[in-house]
Amino acid sequence: MPSPATTTAGYGTGVPDGTPPLPSRISWGAVFAGGVVAVAVATMLNILGVAIGASAVDASAGSTPGASSFGIGAGIWLLVANLIGLATGGYVAARLSGSADVTDSVLHGLSVWAIGFLLSAVLLGNVIAGAASTTVQGASSALGGLMQGAGNAASSAAGPISQAAQRVDPKQLVDRAQNALRTGGDPAQMTSDQRNAEIAQLLTRRVSNGNLDQGDRDRLSRLVATEYNIPPEEASRRLQQVETQANQALQEAETRAREAADAAATAGAVAAYWIFAAMLLGAVAAVLGARVGTRNAAAVRRYA
């Protein structure tokens, strides 16, 4: 039967009754102070880097560094500034915690690393939120220009046939097609609007289905030949040319879209790897700073 002196609340833990609880081994005040110092030091050094980069720009003399050199230099400066800030923050946290235990100091440094990245994320989020409207407007303008350019390219590829089709009101397409049927299907007996309506209908079916059967292709050739007063062979040749150009444009657009998607995926993966490496190096810097800032055990006992 266990002795009452070695039981606590009936659980038999072996801890004598009346033993005071272990004191907290983390100083949150020291951790937050170290995190704030880390962010402040990194921000100060980054501002200095911006000043140095701006000073290197000399548009009048034309001696400005290239974009690649600028980007590499800015990335290295950003990494070094953050490492110095985290090392300083880890040192401050370990020093202010008053602990002489190396493990406790390392954990304080890791806490500073986490707090520092959280504070940086909040600050970065505020900057992004402030620039969001400008970015959206710029993206909308770029997208509008891209869509306009795509429309112009499609119009150039289709030639006069697609231009005639664009003049047709979609709401009147069915009515005009029905009027064309009343003529018995002879293109020569149809008006220009009726022929253009049926041409637009067939072209729309070609775009939607990706192809036309032989009967529809022959019908489209007759309509084009009658509308533009050209031989059927010339009409077929023009339609074949338009179809070839349209297919080529679609293939090129698909290729560019795939290349852009691959480039975006590669860039995202590379950025993620670099962010991971930067965070890992930041943790190492914070731990090293905390180890340097760990108090000497003899000094702690002397001032206790």
Image (tube, rainbow, N blue to C red):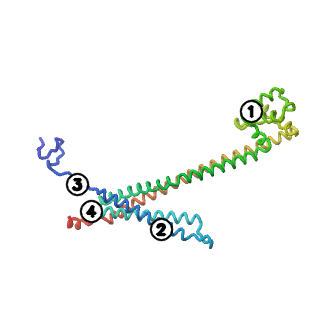
Q: Quadrant of the N terminus?
A: top left
Q: How far separated are the C-alphas under marks 4 and 1?
A: 84 Å
Amino acid type, label 1: Gln
Mark 3 or 1, which is nearer the eye?
1
Q: Quadrant of the C terminus?
A: bottom left
Q: How far separated are the C-alphas under marks 4 and 2?
A: 32 Å
Q: Which residue is mark 4?
A: 98
Q: How far separated are the C-alphas under marks 1 and 2?
A: 66 Å
- What secondary structure is found at the residue carrying circle 3? loop
Q: Which residue is mark 3?
A: 23
- What secondary structure is found at the residue carrying circle 1? helix
Q: How far separated are the C-alphas under marks 3 and 2?
A: 42 Å
Q: Which residue is mark 1?
A: 172
62 vs 292, left or right, is right
- What secondary structure is found at the residue carrying circle 2? helix
Question: What is the x, y in percent for residue 53?
Answer: 53, 68
